[in-house]
Amino acid sequence: MTRMATFFKTTALGGLLVLLPLLLFCLVLSEIFSLILTLTKPIAAFFPQGFFDNAHFPVILSILFLVGASFVIGLALKSKTARRSGTWVETHTIEHLPVYRFVKALVAGLVGAKETSGFQPALLSIDEGVREFAYVVETFDNGEMTVLVPLAPAGFSGPVKIVPEDRVQLLDVGLGQVNLVLNHLGLGSKQILNGKV
């Protein structure tokens, strides 16, 4: 009977180790799809009412709309006039909204935009031979930096510190890669640091 109970327990636990991450993945995917549908509502407002009532794949349609809208806006920003107008509108209106600058820097870091200085992945030296992941938020003229030291597995929460520039080593990897390592409690550090530090 004990052998049977042990077999049942180990088999159920083995299945749970596969099923639980799969369920969590499905939950996250569901939230992402819901967010995508919400984000595309303003775009859908430009179409006649009822135009999308019989859509069979609303999430795919929403993704296509987001990609299309991003492409059109990106294309418009290629012209100097549109870029100047966009910058003026941004600095005089939406830049004053709470967390806008944070979200903009975060998105720029996630997509790997090099023109912004916010949220660059780095290693912060804290003791002799001990380093931790950090995101460079700002660089000062006096040789100091503002860094966010992320807590695993949250990735984008943690203490903000002002540190000397010589204690920070920028990484040539994407923000998303470092965040994924933090989400996995350090698994994958070797792959992103191998040959880069």
Image (cartoon, rainbow, N blue to C red):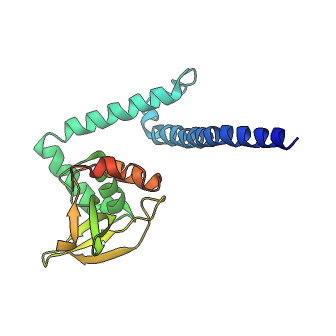
Instruction: Give me the residue at 22% from left, 68% from top.
Output: 168
Looking at this view, is 148 or 30 the one in front?
148
**Where residue 48 appears, x then y in whole percent?**
48, 27
**Quadrant (top left, top right, bottom left, bottom right) of the C terminus:** bottom left
Could you tell me which residue is drawn at 14 percent across and 76 percent down?
A: 143
As drawn, 55 above or below 117: above
Residue 12 drawn at (x, y percent): 73, 39
7 shown above or below 166 = above
Where is residue 196 shown, x and y percent of the image?
Answer: 21, 52
Q: Locate the N terminus and report the quarter of the image it occupies.
A: top right
Decide if residue 171 is on the left or right side of residue 188: left
Q: Nearer the viewer, residue 73 or 51?
A: 73
Q: In the image shown, does 135 or 41 lie closer to the viewer?
A: 135
Count of numbered circles on the image: 0
When the figure is inspected, residue 18 is found, relative to residue 159, above or below; the finding is above
Tell me the quarter of the picture where residue 124 sits. Answer: bottom left
Which residue does the image show at 24% across and 68% down from the upper left? 138
Which sits in the foreground, 173 or 108?
A: 173
Residue 169 position (above or below residue 19): below
Q: Quadrant of residue 141?
A: bottom left
Residue at point 46% right, 53% down?
Answer: 183
